[in-house]
Image: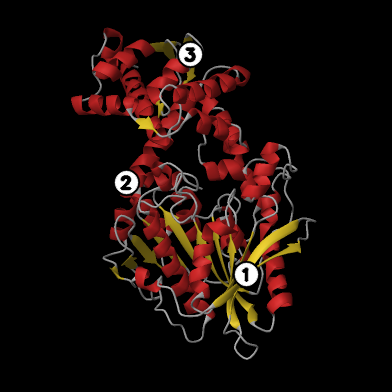
Amino acid sequence: MELLMRRYGLTMLSLLAGLVPLGLPAVAAERVRFQFGELSRDVSVPSLVTFTETGRVNPDLQSYFNLLKPQQQQSLRNLLNQSVPVTDVMASNFLSTPLGKRSLQQLVKVLAQPPEIAEPALSSALILGAAQSGELRLIDVLQAYPTRTLPVNVGAVLSLAQSLTQQFNLQNKLFPRIASIQGEPAQGPDLVTLADKGAVAFTQTPFQFQGRFGDTISAIAYIPNSATSASPARLVLIAPGLNTDMNALLYVGQQLASHGYAVASLNFPFTSANTIKAAIQGTGAIPPANAWYGQPLSVSDLIDQMQQRWGTKVNTAAVGVLGQSLGGYTVTALAGAELDWPYLLKGCDELNDPDKVVLNPAVVWQCVAPGQVVQRKSFRDPRVKAAVAVNPVTNPIFSPTSLKAIAAPILFVSGTGDIFAPPVSQQLIPFTSIQQPGSLLALQHNGTHLSFLDGTSALPAVVIGPDQPLAREELKGMARAFFDEHLSNTPSAPPLAAPTARSGVFSGSDPLRLLITPRFSREQLNQVDPGLKQFP
């Protein structure tokens, strides 16, 4: 039992250390009580404050700190005192969103209190903690929690500690381990050169059309001036992510248009920034639960619009699609991946387990209302001949079996620092099931969920990640090379990676180096970390 308690005590300290990098709250008040069966241990919050501010270890903490080496003690102090650029306004805004509320419901599982008490208390502690200095420190959240003694659900804490530990470890070792497992990669194409602007002039045309759901959809098209009925332009459609709009990725469209592509993008009727803002302000309707599943239909409607408006100048029989995040889900479905409703329901069960804390935003988002689904499985559009899915949300809406239905080459782009659509669950594991020839995985070292988006420079650097202009150049280069290969009989750009490149290729440059590979198996992923065998 003493050994068990020693291991338990070390896990508690690991949990406190692990929460800070994500800006997530720990539980606290004047005392935190960790209950383990009939046994319990108390930790004094003032003692933690003293340790954080001065480095002094009070007697009530000494038994715990005896488990840690001096270097580990210093790491814990640094983490308790580390600030995350989250203001009280940012915390309040996030907690008011559906994703924020669902995330809070998962976090309060670590508190051995009724949800009706724990949820408002933890929400208050997060906001008040961030208000202390305009940033968020774990120690501030501990002091702001509004109860004297706080009992903790040990089972949920252990679940959270395990998942956080694995996530942090993976973030550091994912890129080098995957690269080494496959053998020494060759040098790939120069993406910055591929991202150079072309010489083709094009005309920009905003327009609107009536969607099949009764909504007016705003869109924009770039049509090359050189396009004719005798030489129609290749067409690429862009699908933006949740709470963004068509402008977030239009820089890719402009670059493609300068190389002779016709390009179109749209604002989705239920998930664009304008729609969500209107719903929050009360000036627009709240989107129906799971309406985002039908987003591929809006893209198919956009192809129809391009045919009706510019059919003589644009080839709508062989289309490329590019989407980010929820738009990544959209283009994956258009390429043929089938929605697997039983797999979704099974994957959402963990959110209802009181001893399982799920902080994967992509899973939380997909499981908002898993019982309210449309029964349609396939949104495949046979006109789609190539797809680029950037940080896509894919799991558990798609299953290993349903991903095998993909019928067009697809490029999955994944970032090792993505906390919103984590790479292992949302891109790497799904990619191992894709069998369509010509498909590629591009793993970006240090890339985040926002690395490729335009118009996000006002957000904290910790969320955006390093060198966003470089990331955008890399995406422009990858998109041009991939679409040239699969939509043109005479490509002007070299392929990203030859099918024979078993070890893949390195491309891009530091700090956002890319590993691009046509082959990646579940067995190879398990070699990165044996714990990944637990993933579905």
Which of these two is toward me, 368 or 281? 281
Graded by Cα atoms within 10 Å as few (under 14), some (14 to 19) or many (20 or more), the crowding at tag 3 reads many
Tell me the residue at 23%/14% (across/down).
56
The answer to whether any part of residue 533 appears in the image is yes
* Labels 2 and 1: the sequence-earlier one: 2
Residue 438 vs 323, above or below: the answer is below
Which of these two is toward me, 295 or 369? 295
Tell me the residue at 40%/54% (across/down).
468
Q: Callout 3, which amino acid? A: Leu
User: Residue pushed farthest right?
Assistant: 214
Tell me the residue at 59%/88% (across/down).
231
Determine which residue is flagged by label 3.
150
Q: Is residue 4 left or right of residue 427?
A: left
Q: Is residue 102 left or right of residue 438?
A: right
User: Residue pushed farthest left?
Assistant: 70
Q: Which mark is residue 368?
A: none
Residue 363 vs 429, above or below: the answer is above
* Quarter of the view holding residue 518: bottom left
Q: Which mark is residue 172?
A: 2
Q: CA distance from mark 2 to mark 1?
A: 41 Å
Q: Callout 1, which amino acid? A: Ala
Q: In x, y percent, where is residue 494?
A: 39, 78
Determine which residue is flagged by label 1.
221
